[in-house]
Image (cartoon, rainbow, N blue to C red):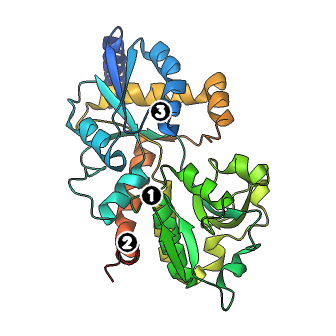
Amino acid sequence: MKLVLLLIGILISSQSLAGTTCSNLAGSEVRWIVPNTTGSAYDTYTRIMKPGLESRLGIRILVDNIPGAGGIKGVRELAAAPPDGTTIGILNGTGILVSGISGSPDIPDLVEDLTILGRASPVQHVWVTSAASDIGVLTDLALPGREPLVFAVRSTASSSFASLSVVAHMLGLNHVFVSGYGSNRDARLALLRGEADAASADVNSASSMLQSGDLRALLQVAQHADPNMPHLENVPVLGELQQRNEDLVEALVSLLGANRLFAAPPDMNADLSKCFETAIAATLKDANISSALRKRASAIQYADGETALADLEKAQAGLSRISSIVTTAIARLRGDD
């Protein structure tokens, strides 16, 4: 009986402490770091969520756009901030991990150098081509006598580059990259202009161009078909085509899924991080906010901090399986091979 009472007392005390910690945030200014430019997808995501988070915590959020080095500059700033509740952020974990493969210097360790507060949704990629292209189905990419395929990417540090290089390796495709597009959307527009044959895109970001008929889907970069994507019902799934490369497929899908992460500086107090985590979850479940995000092709499949951290650790662990493929592709693009 005494043990039960002790446990109840501990539970009540911890809940009280968490409530006190949350109330202490009221009236404060919190900097939300976005490691991307104003108007970018992550910036839009932040500004849609901002009112909901402010009202739930009684805070004032100051959005701080810190673009540069493929998001690394902003993440460095977040990792260096004090863990006192005055700074949080959103980031593209996939891009940071891919930057590490591509050799970018001084990249923060997302597990060790940040407190992960949750994930808005994992990202699934789909290979796309122009609807006007002579590439009708995936098998057309490997037709005998075909010229090297031209893949359009933003940079070698992009998730699209990782998707294209790893899958092309698995499928044995003869290909070259054209990089330097200002954004992933610009790379997709290059397909419509006939500058490239294919690109890899976040399926939600590409949904409007797929539904309008401007783009054609060739491959789902996933382990299994997603029943929530009926418009891709007849599009081949990588995991089903490449069962002999199951470990490689899993590593790539985990990497691409480490996206849309909410984070704070490292070593944040557990009660304080829980305040933000709970408020973020409630904000994403708000009907008006979730509707506004979906209108901008941003799906929501929320994961709490613990789940998001475990998935991030899995993505980091899988890097060793694909890093040599990506670095070889980078060397080919740079003419180093």
Disc 1 residue crowd, few under 14, some 14–19, many 20+, Cα 10 Å: some
Position of the C terminus, as image quadrant, is bottom left
**Which of the 4 quarters of the picture holds residue 121?**
top right
Say which mark, if any, is on residue 299. Answer: none
Q: Disc 1 and disc 2: Cα gap in Å?
A: 13 Å
Tally of marks = 3
**253 w.r.t. 85: above or below:** below
- Indicate whether 173 appears above or below 34: below
Residue appearing at x 65%, y 86% in the figure = 146
Q: Which residue is mark 2?
A: 330
Task: Give the CA separation, mark 3 to mark 2.
Answer: 29 Å
Residue situated in front as seen by the camera: 36 or 241: 36
Observer-side mark, 1 or 3, equals 1
Residue 43 - label = 3
Q: Residue furthest bottom?
A: 144
Q: Position of residue 294 (x, y in %)?
A: 66, 36
Secondary-structure class at tag 1 = loop
Kindly identify which residue carries mark 1.
Answer: 180
Q: Residue at x 77, y 64 (%)?
A: 132
Is there CB contact under 8 Å for labels 1 and 3?
no
Within-10-Å neighbours for mark 2: few <14, some 14–19, many 20+: many
The mark nearer the N terminus, 1 or 3, is 3
